[in-house]
Amino acid sequence: MEESDNIIIEKRSLAEQVYMYLCNSISNGKLKYGDTINTKRLAEELHISMMPVREALKRLEMDGIVEIKPRSVCLLRTPTKEAIMDAIAAREMLEIYSVRSMYASIDVARLDVLREIIDKMKAAIAEDPINLRKYIKYDWQFHKELCNLSGNQFISKFYKELNIRLNMDYMYDIGIKPNVSQTFKDHIDLVEALAAHSPTAVEIIEKHLRISRQNILNGRFFSVQDAAG
């Protein structure tokens, strides 16, 4: 019995690894909404059996992220307007809470991870033409690490799961292009405010997220849906 239980735990652990692999692939833009996932090909790519792959995809289906189709194929669902708005609202709550909870007491040395990402964003901006895709990738990393700095394991977990639905690359595709110079300055100002333990850090993140929301609402995706409605 004990041996059987151990085998089950190992299988679940492998399925969890596949689940997180797929979550990360969606979040970083390797997989996009509308793409298909071939179950057999994924198992071969990861050098594992079909069972943990099926379990991971079944979990994503229960989350409403994929639709399992015949012949070992899955389709990544395109989110609805309502789902996107819910994700944006949840993102705002998590990030604003994170900044509000840490600005007064955060160890300044812990902000180095954000400064390193800012340096990468600066390099992306310096490319000619500007590498917007790379900049957006680092933007997503910045906000993920911002939530990690809160020290709250549930916020980190929820934010990571949230971005499976939000998919930053996709969100910027459906919204208007961000004002890179302004968003870049927001990141710098936010880190400086956190380093100074200033409450203005909360105002900066609130403004930053408000503009991000407006960029999405002004995009073609929402315009088309509003016209159709």
Image: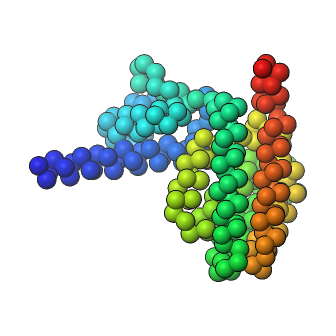
Residue at the (32%, 46%) spot, across then down:
12
- Can see residue 37? no
Report the label total: 0
Residue at the (42%, 44%) spot, across then down:
18
Residue at the (66%, 79%) spot, across then down:
105
- Can see residue 100? yes
Depicted 129 relative to depicted 34: above or below: below
Residue 171: percent from left, percent from top: 72, 40
Residue 60: percent from left, percent from top: 47, 37
Q: In the image shown, does 220 or 99 lie closer to the viewer?
A: 99
| Colour mapping | rainbow
The quadrant of the image that shows the C terminus is top right
Residue 128 appears left or right of 40: right
Depicted 11 relative to depicted 196: above or below: above
Q: In the image shown, does 74 or 95 lie closer to the viewer?
A: 95
Identify the image quadrant of residue 198: bottom right
Residue at the (51%, 63%) spot, across then down:
153
Residue 172: percent from left, percent from top: 75, 42
Residue 228 appears left or right of 58: right
Identify the image quadrant of residue 164: top right
Depicted 119 relative to depicted 196: above or below: above
Identify the image quadrant of residue 81: top right
Residue 14 appears left or right of 130: left
Residue 74: percent from left, percent from top: 48, 27
